[in-house]
Image (cartoon, grey):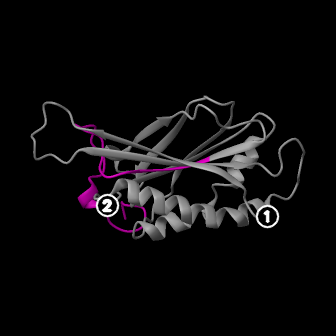
Amino acid sequence: MHLKIRKFQVFVEDSVDASETPRETPLRKVAVAAVLENPYAGRYVEDLQPLIDASGSLGSRLATLAVDALAPYPAQSYGKAAMAGMNGEQEHANALITTTFADPLRNAIGGGKAWIASFTKVGAPGTPIDIPLASKDALYVRSHYDGMTITLHDAPLPNEVVVILCLANRGRIKARVGGLALDRIKGTDGLT
């Protein structure tokens, strides 16, 4: 299956709290979105595997755009989301952000062994969507629990899906709720 992409959109947010020292690294969050035709809009299809298989190349393209937008910083957190237009199903959005889609992101950022937080929904153009973020190396790094909200004024149209990757270069500014520190990660789950 070939995915028909209408457009890509890149969002960049840099935040530095006024009380932080000038040497503090700003928190950069980036989201990259692809707006594409939903080949299953308006009809029920039992087997979504062709959509899952096609998502790998989309993941590669979005990963490249996200890494470029985050530069010069390396990624510490990641997340993914998708929103189907009103003629689609939430399941169509989910099919586009499985492991097939996400593995190119892990490769592009130099690994990432943690589960990638995700969110899907059905919505109309202009509907906000929240992309959750968590540490790329261990889910229990609380300082990196965050998110980014984006809105595309003209998407998704009823027969489209918006697919989104999000990256951040650090944890929240002034994070102080405890939990596993980034520099104390061990093993594949961060704890053992």
Name which residue lies at 63% across and 55% down: 97
Name the one closer to the observer, 176 or 84: 84
State the count of labels. 2
What x and y, as percent, mark residue 106?
47, 66
Q: Which mark sits nearer the N-terminus, 2 or 1? A: 1
Name which residue lies at 64% across and 58% down: 98
Task: Quadrant for residue 160, please give it.
Answer: top right
Name the one closer to the observer, 73 or 138: 73
Task: Quadrant for residue 70, please give it.
Answer: bottom left
Disc 2 to disc 1: CB gap under 8 Å: no
Name which residue lies at 67% across and 37% down: 121
Residue position for label 2? 74
What x and y, as percent, mark residue 191?
36, 60
Circle number at residue 155: none
Question: The C terminus appears in which quarter of the rendering?
Answer: bottom left
Q: Mark 2: which secondary structure? A: loop
Circle number at residue 50: 1
> Which segment is the magenta one?
163-192
- Asked whether residue 77 is in view, the answer is yes
